[in-house]
Amino acid sequence: MQLRNFFTPTWAVIAAGLLFGAYFAIGELSVGGMLATNNGMIWTLPLVTYIFLALMSTGVSIVLCHGTLTQRDEIMRQQRSLLVLAASLLIGGFVALGTELGSPLHLFWLVFSPNLTSPIWYMGTLYSIELVLLLVKLVRDLQGHHGRIDQSLTWATLGVAVAAALMLGAVFGTVTGRADFHGLHASILTLTAALASGAAVIVLTQPSGGLPQIYIRALRGFSALMAILLTLRWGYEVHSSVVDLQGWVTVWMIAPLAVVALFGGRLPRTAAALVAAVSLWVVLAFVITGQMVTLGPMATWYGAVQAYRPNLAEVGILVLGIAVAAALFQLGRQAWLSSSPQAGR
């Protein structure tokens, strides 16, 4: 890897994001109290950053595993790049999650005092296993080791990735007393968002030149699936009489996805950026709206229904998670390009 590869506009943007986000992350971990949270609104943008990046990684893993198992040539040629991308996104998500916990000791106790009845513990465990499987597959690919075990690893990665996305939704869907969270739709939402955002980031990170049609079809198909899901949810919210249901779906979420599904093949990278942005918006709206109704005596302090606006520190954690993922992906891709002229083609 040559030093001049780091003196590029891409690396300048990544470095700026790392410095900006690290400032707030260090402050939160060492001083604390920088995030816009309270006892009634405990899950905000930093956790949403983890969810967004973890689901995006899941989507990449599912596309990769499906392409490998079905022997799709376009995906097989990019296996190493997609492995790096999936692992980088997941590590970026874990960085955001570690910051959101507020203290290194919280992360320590989360790992070493497991609660086997908690969906949160299973979610973290499944994503940790997924990261290990991705790294094992990447190391084997770098060493040129291929054989029957690869198919078993691929099936395991696919199963764990799908289970992790569903369990992430179950973290919210099993919450008692939160009308906007409760139900099976939460797991369906997280899996669908994973597929759409995963296809989007694959398109966005493709090398300049021809864009494989399989990725464009995946982007349009998964966008259509997500648009249908949100439309059904919107219809439910409009006609529901459930007490305390606030509703988080808007037509402005559905419309961009529908446009991408219909016309995304004309400007695929622009369409992919739009889908990624909408996916982040959907996750943020879902997580925040589910906490807006204040439960119990806390309504005395926070009011019956809360409002939320991310502060600069929370935006910094979002930037940090994305910047870490981008930096790792760029490092991996440049290391591959320096050793293999066929990389990324």
Image: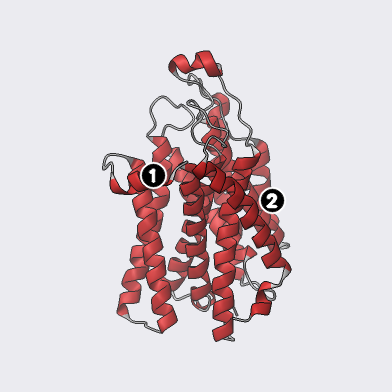
Question: Residue 259's mark?
Answer: 2
Rendered residue at 65%/61% (across/down): 15
The image shows residue 294 at horizontal and vertical percentages of 50, 21
The image shows residue 288 at horizontal and vertical percentages of 55, 33
Rendered residue at 62%/53% (across/down): 276
Q: Amino acid at mark 1?
A: Leu
* Residue at the extreme front: 31
Can residue 264 be seen in this snapshot?
no
Question: Residue 91's mark?
Answer: none
The answer to which image quadrant residue 210 occupies is: bottom right
Q: Is residue 99 above or below residue 233?
A: below
Q: Secondary structure at mark 2?
A: helix
Left or right: 122, with 312 as reference point: left
Rendered residue at 49%/75% (across/down): 80
Q: Is residue 340 above or below residue 83?
A: below
Q: Is residue 217 above or below residue 315?
A: below
Residue hosting label 1: 105
The image shows residue 66 at horizontal and vertical percentages of 44, 67
